[in-house]
Amino acid sequence: MLDGQSLREDAETALRALVGREDATLREDQWRAIEALMAFRRRALVVQRTGWGKSAVYFVATRLLRDRGAGPTVIVSPLLALMRDQISAAARAGIKAVTINSANVTEWDDVHRAIADGEVDVLLCSPERLNNPGFRDEVLPRLAADAGLVVID
């Protein structure tokens, strides 16, 4: 188990980088979800309203996991606009996020290569892409074996 106090400090630091505010702090529910994932390696189900900060939970956990040598986070998200926003938010926190969806078909080979080379911290993927036979057979097994975190958003 990780030391709770230093883990909390690392999580708060990651949150401040993510939101770009030095006064940002995790809410207690956010911290409990991150602590469950990080300190206890538990699964976590976070069901909250829009704007509550679910993305902060999984981006902070991703930063902490990657800093400790874990594989990339896979986020399944059906909304292309949300994916674009999340890529921008991740970049602010120093997290390399990429997406595979119907809007960037010409980039898929480059994304697959970056994943294979360990250059990706977060892969945002549409549910439809998960069901694609080529992705399911060639990319998904490696991702599933190496993923530090899997998120269904």
Image (tube, rainbow, N blue to C red):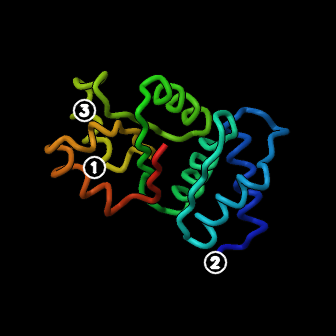
| Comes first in the chain, label 2 or label 3 | 2
Q: Secondary structure at mark 2?
A: loop
Tell me the tag on residue 1: 2
Asked if residue 84 lies left or right of residue 46, the reply is: left
Tell me the tag on residue 67: none
Query: For mark 3, what is the residue?
Result: 108
Q: Amino acid at mark 1?
A: Ala
* Residue pictured at 53% horizontal, 26% vertical: 85
- Give coordinates of residue 112: x percent, y percent: 26, 41
- Give coordinates of residue 105: x percent, y percent: 23, 25
Count of marks, rendered view: 3
Specify the farthest residue to the bottom.
1
Asked if residue 57 lies left or right of residue 106, the reply is: right
Q: CA distance from mark 2 to mark 1?
A: 29 Å
Q: Nearer the viewer, residue 63 or 102?
A: 102
Q: Amino acid at mark 2?
A: Met
* Residue pictured at 74% horizontal, 70% vertical: 4
Query: For mark 1, what is the residue?
Result: 116
Q: Residues within 10 Å of mark 1 (few under 14, many from 20)?
A: few
* Residue pictured at 36% horizontal, 50% vertical: 118
| Quarter location, residue 32 | bottom right
Residue 140 vertical position relative to residue 131 in the rendered view, above or below: below
